[in-house]
Image: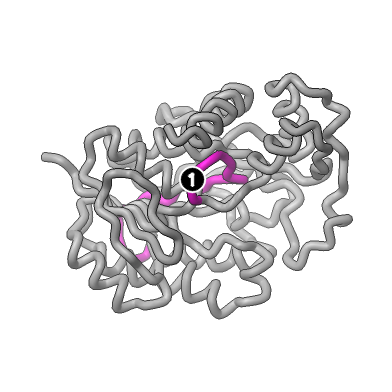
Amino acid sequence: MILRILVTGGTGLLGYWVTRVFRDRGFDVYATYHEKTPPKVDVKWIRLDLESLENIVNTVYEVKPNIVIHTAAYTDVDGCEVNREKAYRVNYLATKALVKASKDAELFMYISTDYVFDGVRGMYGESDVPAPINYYGLTKLLGEVAVASTTNNSCIIRVSGLYGYSPTGKKNFGVIALEKLSRGEPVEAFINQWLSPTYVKFLAEKLVGVVEVKNTGVIHIAGERLSRYEFALILADVLGVSRDLVKPKRLEEAKLIAPRPRDSSLDTSKARELGLTLPPVRECLRDMVLTRGKLVEGV
């Protein structure tokens, strides 16, 4: 039987690659979009407003998915801090409505974040107690609670610092750094914030593995522990440009609205045991460079 997959946020950075990868693997994919025009990926596109609970329920009843992969979220960390009502509606209430409507699905996969942790020590495992320090992290944690308390057939995937190219996704640090370095322009990068940068294309491929074996519970699927400065230096090496283009900057100099965890890196030992480990960062970055060229050329 060909499984029917519902992907929320199909025009987002991760959602695009999930939609594309699952289609290429032969799944029957339904993907949602809201304001952005859907890319030219041959799947069934459905317009979905996550702030309309009725729209959410009707979409699930229409699709009747075997698997739900919930990638859509309000991910603007500073925006969530300012517009808390929207963050609460999109990241919590919408998730709660979606998982409740999808209670008959074989698997509900929720994409969460390293920002559920406070960042005091880093290398957080799945059993560590979350303690978000910004409103984005809090609403994503509430989403986790809604999922885990509604169905036993759920898998919460925590990721960190998503990067990569997509034709519709907003630019992320990895893409901005690549484009600047490619033009010989300097890139400022934090030397005192650590995370586990996660390449979306390879992450989407690992999610296929989660679906195939119906993994449940919480799993951290993310890259290596790096500061943004270390990440940018490796990118400069991959591009063959001078490391001098990467300029160190301290997190506090950015004067961001929402507080950021100092070290929200994730322990991926469980993912390794399950065969869900991502390739080394250099391999990910080399693929991102190649993928950028293909997408720019419209391939």
The residue drawn where x is 43% and y is 53% is 11
In depth, the one of 194 and 175 nearer the eye is: 175
Q: On the rendered image, what quadrant is the N terminus found in?
A: top left
Eyeballing the image, is 85 above or below 156? below
User: How packed is label 1: few (under 14 Cα within 10 Å), some, or many (20 or more)?
Assistant: some
* Residue 133 location (% of width, % of height): 69, 64
The residue drawn where x is 69% and y is 37% is 179
* Residue 26 location (% of width, % of height): 22, 35
Q: Left or right? Give the position of 250 relative to 101.
A: right
* Residue 142 location (% of width, % of height): 50, 67
Render colour scheme: one colour
In depth, the one of 34 and 137 nearer the eye is: 34
* Magenta-drawn segment: 149-168
Instruction: Let me know if residue 64 appears in the view.
Output: yes
Of all residues, the one furthest to the front in this rendering is 297
Q: Label 1 amino acid?
A: Pro
The residue drawn where x is 35% and y is 37% is 21
Q: Left or right? Give the position of 158 relative to 82.
A: left
In depth, the one of 54 and 214 nearer the eye is: 54
Q: Left or right? Give the position of 127 relative to 146.
A: right
In depth, the one of 245 and 114 nearer the eye is: 245
The image quadrant that residue 197 belongs to is: top right
Q: Which residue is mark 1?
A: 167
* Residue 101 location (% of width, % of height): 26, 68
